[in-house]
Image: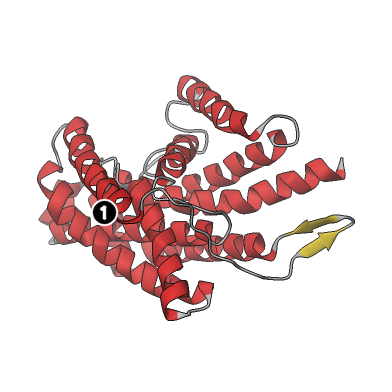
Amino acid sequence: MLGIFASIIDGVLVGLVYGLSAMGLTLIWGVMDVINLTHGTMIVAGMFALYFLVSALGLPPYFALPPVLIGGFLVGVLLYWIAVHRMVGRPALMSLLSTFAVNLVLIGVGTGVWGTALFNVAVSLPGVSIDRYTFPGAHILAAALAALIAAALYFFLHRTRLGKAVRAVADNREAAELVGIPTTRVLALSVGFGVALAGVSGMLIGTLFPFTVLSGDGYQLKGFVVTVLGGFGNPVGALMGGVALGLLEGAVTPFVPVSWTLVIEFVLFVLVLIAFPGGVFARRGVM
């Protein structure tokens, strides 16, 4: 029984990182109704940025967080102007195709340069032991950082002038333009923030698990499950959805092979779409 409890707690810790990742996905959707199919690749970019900053520059793993955050933001702004700007306001399929094309290019370049070799970043932190079970220190710290960044995003959206502008554009872009908010700039910044969150979550995941250039697909799929649980356009709901998904993974892992975990998650995905089309943790309003 204690083993199941320990698995659930560890799942919740990892789920907080999943939630942070999905916050980037749902932020972009909430502001401009665009589904970013480069999300998984940006998570992998965060992993590789961590790897090269640690191996090439000798940085301690968690010191890579600020440059990954800044680099992710700049890449996100560039992505907006390359693939998203002309698709805003058009049918959702247009943005899907546009970001999917960029995703294919990035994956092609990545596999051409690094192949599909497995990479790993060694992180050694003392864990917390309960009876004969030890919760890895890397999992605890990753969860704490994810929760801290999520809280910072919430503060930014609700307590700063720029954050309120982002919410205004998400709620009614035309009205925001009428009161003088530079909506195009806000949209570009929003994609920057969304990609930065994806990159940072990838960096945190890279401290927990090995990865390859192709690892992004699995995490992107988890991101969609979490986003549906939390409700599109609801960053707080995404974080709660991530915790719920992590709890589910932790609860089923002791009883089924790991290969069945993703199947169970997608069964949950379909059931939630049927029973709660707006998301389990959806709420009125935007963000």
- Percent across and percent down for residue 247 are 65, 41
Q: Secondary structure at mark 1?
A: helix
The three-letter code of the residue at mark 1 reads Ala
Judge the density around disc 1: few (<14), some (14-19), many (≥20) Cα neighbours within 10 Å.
many
User: Where's residue 82, x and y in %?
Assistant: 13, 53
Q: In this image, 138 relative to 270: left or right? A: right
> Please, is residue 162 above or below residue 23 in the view?
below
Determine whether 285 is above or below 66 in the image.
above
Residue at left offset 14%, top offset 57%: 184
On the image, numbered disc 1 is attached to which residue? 168
Farthest residue to the top: give it.
274
- What x and y, as percent, mark residue 206? 51, 59
Q: Quadrant of the N terminus?
A: top right
Q: Is residue 168 left or right of residue 279?
A: left
The way the protein has been coloured in the rendering is: secondary structure
Q: Residue 146, how many percent across, how many down?
A: 53, 61
Q: Is residue 27 visible?
A: no
Q: Who's the residue at 29% across and 40% down the image? A: 35
Residue at 44% from the left image edge and 37% from the top image edge: 221
Count numbered badges in the picture: 1
Q: Is residue 96 left or right of residue 215?
A: left
- Report if residue 275 is visible in the image: yes
Looking at the image, the residue that sits furthest to the right is 131
> In this orientation, which residue lies closer to the viewer: 73 or 102?
102
